[in-house]
Each structure stands twice: as C-alpha cells, then as structure tokens.
Amino acid sequence: MNDASAPKLVEVLPQHRLDDARLTDYLARHIAGFTPPAVIRQFQGGQSNPTYLIEASGQRYVLRKKPPGTLLPSAHQIDREYRIQSALAATAVPVAPMLHYCDDETIIGTSFYLMAHVAGRVFHDVMMPGVSAPDRGAIQRNLIEAIAALHSVDYRAVGLESFGRPDNYVARQIDRWTRQYEASKTEDLPAMTNLIAWLRANIPARDETAIVHGDFRLGNMVVDQDQPRIAAVLDWELSTLGHPLADLAYCCMSYHLPPGSGPAMAGYQGIDVAAMGLMSEAEALALYASLTGRAAIEHWQFFMGFSLFRSAAIVEGVYARSLAGNAADERAGRMHDMCIAVAETGWNVVRGG
C-alpha cells in the first residue's frame, strides 16, 4: 500500500481516551468471536466523530463514537450512521458491514457503534499520488458511479422513509447551516453573509428527494488495495433524505478549489486534469446524468454555491471545536483560514466571478 494512501493511525488522543477494559469486556459479551486483549488506536484525519481501530483475536474492527464536550444541535448522530449503512448493505452502494450499536453511555462515555474493518487505501489528496493515470481515472469514475447508485436507491424500499423530511431540503439546509455557522463563527465574513443571502433568494423551484450522503468525496472512500474501485463509503454522519444535486455538487467541489487548500478540501484548480487521467467537471456531470437518466444537470451554479457555503460552515464549526479543545484532528486549528477561502469561492461562483 502506498504510504500516502494508508489510513494514518495514532495513539489515542488524550481527549478521546476510552475505558479500554470496560469496552473490551462489553465487546466480548456482544460480538461473536471477540476475545480480549485488544489493541486500540485512533484514526487520524477525521474532523468530527472520533474513530478507532480495534485489533483482537486476529480480527480488525472499527469503532465510531460521538466526540466529548458540548455539541452543536442535531450533530454527531451516530445512530443514523449505523442505521443507514445497515439499510444499504443489500444495495449497489459499497458500505462496511455493521456489527453492533450501543446506546449505553456508561461504557465509554458516549454511544458508539462497531463495524467490520474494510482494508484498503484512503486518498485525502484528490490527486491520488502514486496512482497511475488510468487507475486514477477508474477510481474517479467509480466515485461518480457510487454516488449515482446511492441516489438511485428507493429509500422507501430499504426502510428509510423516516430518515428525513422528503421536501424543501435545500431551504432547510440553508437555515440549519446558517444557524450552526452563526453559533460557531469567530468573526464576520462578508463573503459568507453575501453567499447566504444569494442562496436564500435563488432556491430552485423544482424539488427532488433521494438518499444523500452529505460528505461524499474521495477522502471518505476506502479504495481497494489492489484494484481501482471503491470498497466502502465511510462517514455517513450527515446523511439524510435530500436533494441529490446538492450531494453531487459537494462531490464535485474539487473542481473549484486549489490543490493546496487542505486534505479535506484539496482541488483541481489550475491542474490539467486530462493529463492526470481525470474527467473534467463537465464530463463528470455528463456521466452522472447518464447513470441517473437525466437529460442535463440544472441549476449547477446554485448547487455548487450551496455546497461551498455548507462546507465553509462545517469547517468553521471544526475550528470552533478546536478552540474548545475537543476537535478530532490536529489540523483543526487551521480551519478558519479554509472557511474564509471556501466562502469567498462560493460567493465568486454564484455571482459568476
């Protein structure tokens, strides 16, 4: 495995330490074949819910839990992560096998769930260093195929009709992320203020509803160790029922961001994507349209601006948590500069700059 794509493991951070003995005793009683002792380490790179690798009895498991401290309203609902991945297990969307959900907060301080570990590569850099151009293109194509497969799932047929409200997703999301941004912002940003006002005034009249991931990007994919295909889609914290084009726009934000803008936000701006084996944004949209039976992708400027706004709100929240000392990643302190850059990009997109 290329070192750049190997998921980074660290010793459990002080603010995310667990009661190892209590946890392993609990898992031994609830997970078939789990026998202590266990080695527990933390994945580095996540900005929200702390995620751990647990090795015991020759098996590997992944544990996801809520972060410590005071949390923003409606955030970190890991029960929803467990529910949706369980529901998608029999569909064409690649997900990790879900093993157990625990809502007893006395075990490790918060609710958590356990899933099987899916071996593979994780590319936080959208340029996928060390990968050949043909394989890079195949992985990117599979990314679009995976999001198209997700949006094609009949949410009623998989028992997710109550997973979210099937109407006015965009308007509700603008309100939600505006509130969360206002709750966590550290200074007034004119670009963000202008972007929010423009989005509120330009919501498309036609509504659609599908299962949306909410954070669908290359860095949340486990790519097979040997083949250029996605083995599992991770990090379903923001999933709900919503507008599929909002999800697609988030997936395509890389086309509007510079390469050096941080692991979660790195982009293709100024890059000859064809020389790298990658599709242009227009080609990616055409592929998605063909896979989902659309004649065209409408209101793309709006949905891209919306996704950039929401991303700016999210990273400002990460920055606020870092100031409070409970963010899940050592890079969180640099997020405020990213918030400013992403908000300015969004404002430029919607006003045609």
Image (tube, helix red, strand yellow):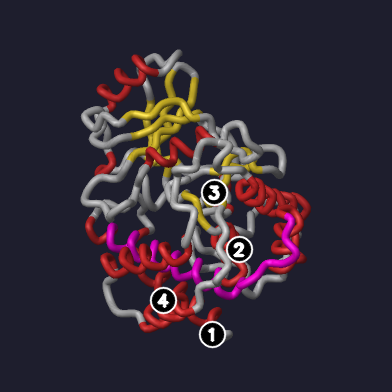
Residue type, label 3:
Ile
Distance of label 2 from label 4 (alpha carbons) = 20 Å
Tell me the magenta residue range: 293-321
Badge 2 element:
loop
- First in sequence, mark 3 or 2: give its number: 3
- First in sequence, mark 2 or 4: give its number: 4
Q: Which residue is mark 4?
A: 196
Q: x and y percent of residue 229 in the render?
A: 69, 43
Distance of label 3 from label 1 (alpha carbons) = 29 Å
Q: Foreground: 157 or 75? A: 157
Q: Dividing the image into 4 quarters, which one contains the N terminus?
A: top right
Label for residue 252?
Answer: 2
Mark 3 or 4: the one toward you: 3
Residue type, label 2:
Cys
Q: Given contact means CB atoms under 8 Å apart, are the residues at marks 4 and 1 in contact?
A: no
Label for residue 22?
Answer: none
Mark 3 or 2: the one toward you: 3
Q: Residues within 10 Å of mark 4 (few under 14, many from 20)?
A: many
Q: Is residue 45 visible?
A: no
Distance of label 4 from label 1 (alpha carbons) = 12 Å
- First in sequence, mark 4 or 1: give its number: 4
Q: Is residue 235 visible?
A: yes
Residue type, label 4:
Ile
Q: Which residue is mark 3?
A: 211
